[in-house]
Image (cartoon, grey):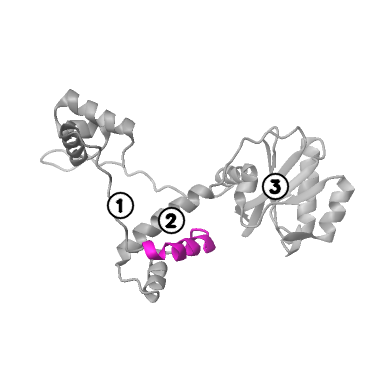
Amino acid sequence: MKSPGEFMEILAAYDLTRSYRDAANICGVSHNTVRSYVKARQEGAQAPLARHRGRMTDPFLPQMISWVEQSRGKIRGDVVHEKLIALGFTGCERTTRTTLAELKAKYRARNVRVHRPWTPEPGLWLQFDYGDGPVVDGVKTVLFVAWLAFSRFRIVIALRDKTMPSVFAALDRTFRLIGGIPTYILTDNEKTVTVEHVAGIPVRNAQIVAFSRHYSTSMQTCIPADPASKGGVENAVKIAKADLGPQRDEPPARVPVFRRAGGRM
């Protein structure tokens, strides 16, 4: 149902154009709506009420909302349709998918992740991650990428592997290059950093704890399977892989061959 303000806008648009369709294009409604409103004004009646047409999925909305919440908006339409049929639903799969798409859109709107600008203090945060490096002497290398949050300073070090001695050497070299020790170091939950999770709490590797205590820093890890929590170093890894990774050889350009008319060249 339109509000009184929208009702007056539709009538004003019709008075200007004297055309149902032109007024409908101006107000973004159907020409039938304009016709019904103009007819109601001519008869001195109130604006017609919009009729609510229910869907066949309305009786099953609580179950569908529960499935969307439990799956965090990942459940598929065919799965929901099979569940509804078991509950006595007689509609088609298209009706199920239409209602499910609306429920998923509402769920994403309520649970959207908001990214706010991050302005850390100088020397407070350092992030590091790994990327696939080029093959050297038949051995695949690993790119150790460190990203200093405040200055956006990037460091890339090629390693043979991701074992503990290699990680210690890369971190020590990083500290010497930036000329100091950051307060916090953020990285993934590699086995060299986090051994396991108990009740959602990460259990640190004893060697990395001793390393952090020696350098007077604190090793922090992001949420598992959440690369956005350390997006700075993730973008730095992409740049490093693009700059240092092997590039695909482009095929040689074809040289055009010109022929004379009526003869060979």
- Judged from this view, the residue extending furthest toward the right is 214
Query: In the rendered image, which residue does mark 1 sit on?
Result: 52
Query: In the figure, is residue 42 to the left or right of 27?
Result: left
Residue at 40% across, 54% down = 102
CA distance separating discs 1 and 3: 56 Å
Residue under label 3, please give it.
128
Determine the image quadrant of residue 91.
bottom left
Q: Mark 2 — residue?
A: 103
Report whether 29 appears left or right of 237: left
* Picture layout, residue 43 above or below residue 136: above
Cβ atoms at labels 2 and 1 below 8 Å apart: no
Query: Of helix, strand and loop, which mostly describes the magenta segment?
Result: helix
Decide if residue 137 is in sight here.
no
Cα separation between marks 2 and 1: 18 Å
Amino acid type, callout 2: Leu
Label located before the other in sequence (1 or 3): 1
Residue sitting farthest toward the bottom: 86
The image quarter in which residue 28 lies: top left
Q: From this view, report whether residue 173 is shown above or below residue 38.
A: below
Q: Are marks 2 and 3 in contact (CB under 8 Å)?
A: no
Q: Residue at x 31, y 38 (%)?
A: 2
The amino acid type found where label 1 is placed reads His
Residue at (80, 56) in percent of width and height? 165
- Could you say whether the residue bearing mark 1 is in a helix, strand or loop? loop
Q: Marks 2 and 3, how far apart in space?
A: 38 Å
Question: At which x and y percent is residue 209?
Answer: 84, 55
Identify the image quadrant of the N terminus.
top left
Q: Mark 3 is on which residue type?
A: Phe
Pointer 2 or 1: first along the chain: 1
Q: Secondary structure at mark 2?
A: helix
Q: Which residues are magenta?
A: 58-75
Asked whether 158 or 99 is in front, the reply is 99
